[in-house]
Amino acid sequence: MNLSDITSKKKIEDISKEKNIIKILKGVIISIVISILLLTIYAVILTYTSTSENTIKPVVITITGISLLIGSFISSMKLKKQGMLNGGIVGFIYILSIYIISSIWLSNFSIDLESIIMIIVSIITGMIGGIIGINIK
């Protein structure tokens, strides 16, 4: 193996990493957009119907799960391997983004046991979406 082969291989790896980062960011953005759309629909339903406010937590968790499954699925579809890792990263960046926005928006924001559970669920849901994404052709 000569120096030009090593350089070419390095360039290919760098391009591959850049494409993967773009796919991850695309998955996060798709997940956030889907969440915003579904949460807006839910807010309208909550406002104009007699739907109980007790449904807020389960609906938010469900919307987060659906959004992450779709986002991590889409970001992993064209990968040949590491769908679980890719999806987990999508889930982590998604929930981190949500918590950063929440901490800026809300003055009494804190991380508690419920938040930690949501972080874990988001990463696992992203991993599942990533696994499905690489296995569906």
Image: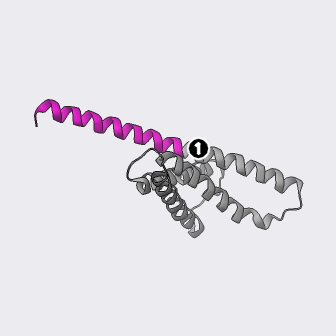
- The answer to whether 131 appears left or right of 58 in the picture is left
Q: Position of residue 98 (x, y in %)?
A: 59, 51
- The answer to whether 10 appears left or right of 94 in the picture is left
Q: How many marks?
A: 1
Q: Residue furthest bottom?
A: 113
Say which element carries label 1. Answer: helix
Q: Residue furthest front?
A: 137
Q: Residues within 10 Å of mark 1 (few under 14, many from 20)?
A: many
Q: Residue furthest top?
A: 4
Q: Residue at x 78, y 67 (%)?
A: 54
Compare residues 38 and 128 and report the one nearer the observer: 128
Main secondary-structure element of the magenta-colored stretch: helix
Rendered image quadrant of residue 5: top left
Q: Position of residue 130 (x, y in %)?
A: 48, 54
- Asked if 10 appears above or below 91 in the picture, the reply is above
Q: Which residues are magenta?
A: 1-27
Rendered image quadrant of residue 84: bottom left
Q: Is 36 colored magenta in this rendering?
A: no
Q: State which quarter of the image contains the N terminus.
A: top left
- Asked if 2 appears above or below 61 in the picture, the reply is above
**Pointer 1: what residue?**
30
Q: Is 18 colored magenta in this rendering?
A: yes
Q: Residue at x 66, y 50 (%)?
A: 35
- Asked if 14 appears above or below 99 in the picture, the reply is above
Q: Position of residue 30 (x, y in %)?
A: 58, 44
Q: Residue at x 71, y 50 (%)?
A: 38
Rendered image quadrant of residue 64: bottom right
> What's under tag 1, amino acid-wise?
Ile
Q: What colouring style does the render use?
A: one colour
Q: Residue at x 43, y 53 (%)?
A: 83
Q: Position of residue 62 (x, y in %)?
A: 66, 61
